[in-house]
Amino acid sequence: MMPFILRRVGFYVIAAWIGVTINFLLPRLMPGDAATAAFAAQYQKLSSNPAALEQIRAAFGITDDPIWVQYGQYLGGLFTGNLGVSYTFFPTSVSDVIAQSLPWTIALVGCAALIAFVIGSLVGILAAWRRGGFVDTFFPPFALFLGAFPAFFLGLLLLYFFSVQLGWLPSGHGYTPGIPPSWQWTSILDLVSHAVLPAATIVFISIGGWILSMRNTMVSVLNEDYITLAEARGLSQRRVMFGYAARNALLPQLTGLALALGFLVGGQVLVEYVYTYPGLGSILAYAVGSKDYPLIQGMLLAVTMCVLAANFLIDIAYLALDPRTREVAVG
């Protein structure tokens, strides 16, 4: 197993290097540079002062050195945690902004994605096991109907009913002023209450896909010979359903989970923006609106690393769930 893990680590190190390189090249292949754009947008009165522009470029680490020299400086900055300075939150560094917002997004998206994955997979298993029953007839189309709503629209609906009308849950932000995040029960309950609505929005828009994909995969697995053999041996329906059919049908779901986690980390900008949740989505929306190129670049790098980390964890999970993977690893 260790050689398999080492091979996967090597693969993801190369993938991370490619992502870092693309992240470095993209803004430098565009006409002009980030400092010039910020200078034009925020310092129009000084547009005739080249010295001021050079000071801005120097402050944000933009130089006219050859591309390979800039690349070396960029890699050195990554290893030391120096991703530049944010225009929007000046003089806060990009690393500090990401460090403050990334845990919020990982907690929100991670919990919501796992809830949608577990519930959707269970409903898909039951729908396939009892095809044509109530679960199979009602839940897949209803979940897909919810998922057809735009994320921001569904978020506004939940916000209106459960916060404005009923007053059951907070209307936004990550915590209540005066109750800073901590490990005390009061703070934990406050954090959970603020995360319920954005998490529910993510669950509702994604659970339909999990139900449908698990149901379809499960239906195919139930037609396999080893399922017929397990039933012929007199094994209980619960064991056949979960120990044989669901276990094998779950493998393609895990691949989808890794991809979904990466998409949700970078794709739920509007959800966090609707609820003013202090995660990557809200910060990225502000960064794009203010043309904060260093922060956008750092955010994209963080999302890339999250995608690779999620895929690596899923590869390790395959070792535990699929004996064939362990045989290949040992071989």
Image (tube, rainbow, N blue to C red):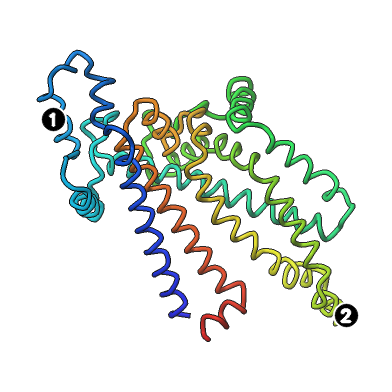
User: Mark 1 against mark 2, which lies toward the viewer?
Assistant: 1
Q: Is residue 148 left or right of residue 40?
A: right
Please report the residue visible at 34 percent of the width from the left and 28 percent of the height from the top.
291
Residue 87's image quarter? top left
Task: Give the SS element for disc 1.
Answer: helix
Please report the residue visible at 69 percent of the width from the left and 68 percent of the height from the top.
247
* Mark 1 vs 2, N-terminal side: 1
Residue at the top extreme of this rendering? 45
Q: Is residue 69 left or right of residue 157?
A: left
Q: Do tag 1 and tag 2 residues touch (Cβ < 8 Å)? A: no
Q: Is residue 157 left or right of residue 15?
A: right
Report the disc number at residue 54: 1
Report the disc number at residue 87: none
Query: In this picture, is 3 found above or below 314?
Result: below
Identity, as a three-letter code, of the amino acid under mark 2: Ala
Circle 2 crowding by C-alpha within 10 Å: few under 14, some 14–19, many from 20: few
Q: How many marks?
A: 2
Residue 185's image quarter? top left
Identity, as a three-letter code, of the amino acid under mark 1: Glu
Please report the residue visible at 63 percent of the width from the left and 53 percent of the height from the top.
117
- Asked if residue 80 can be seen in this view, the reply is no
Query: In this picture, is 66 found above or below 251?
Result: above
Query: In this picture, is 61 found above or below 72?
Result: above
Residue 166 on image: x %, y %: 63, 23
Task: Give the SS element for disc 2.
Answer: helix
Please report the residue visible at 62 percent of the width from the left and 79 percent of the height from the top.
324
Residue 30 on image: x %, y %: 33, 37
Circle 1 crowding by C-alpha within 10 Å: few under 14, some 14–19, many from 20: some
Real-space Cα separation, disc 1 to disc 2, in angstroms = 79 Å
Report the disc number at residue 232: 2
Question: Could you say which is closer to the camera, residue 49 or residue 141?
Answer: 49
- Asked if residue 305 can be seen in this view, the reply is yes
